[in-house]
Image (tube, rainbow, N blue to C red):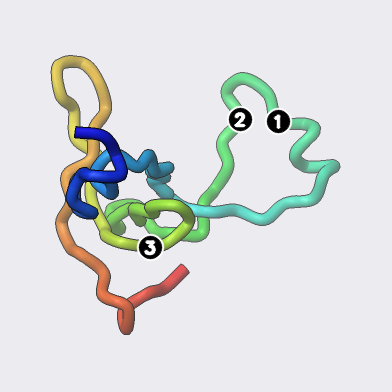
Amino acid sequence: MNAAMAPASDVVLDVGVRLTLEVGRARMTIRDFLVLGPGSVVQLERPAGDPLDVFVNDRLVAHGEVVMVNDKYGVRFTEAVGASDKRR
């Protein structure tokens, strides 16, 4: 079946999206950024233990937590974010 004959839901399911996980943010000057090197620590605005934000194509869709899966990092979704809950 070609795309013109496929049900709309089948076509949409194959569309690629960009998934972004945000742990926190920090503001700094270019001067401070340029002195960062191996071992530097950047303090984030979000407190430790807060859930990370999950974005799909720059839209906040969920909150989650970092997990380890077979020696790789993953994310466990803990809360879906509705349109009225959106925060950045």
Q: Earlier in the sequence, mark 3 or mark 1?
A: 1
Is 88 placed above or below 28 here?
A: below
Amino acid type at circle 2 is Ser
- The residue that label 1 is drawn on is 36
Label 1, secondary structure: give it.
Answer: loop
> In the shown orientation, is residue 57 left or right of residue 25?
left
Is 45 placed above or below 21 here?
A: below
Residue that lies at the very extreme toward the right in this rendered image: 31
Which image quadrant for residue 35? top right
Amino acid type at circle 3 is Leu
| Residue nearest the observer in this picture, 27 or 85 | 85
Q: Which residue is rendered at x = 23% and y = 44% of the image?
A: 5
Label 2, secondary structure: give it.
Answer: loop
| Residue nearest the observer in this picture, 9 or 39 | 9
Label 3, secondary structure: give it.
Answer: strand
The percent position of residue 70, horizontal first and vertical second, equals 14, 16
Label disc, if present, on residue 60 of the rendered structure: 3
Dots 1, 2 in contact, CB < 8 A: yes
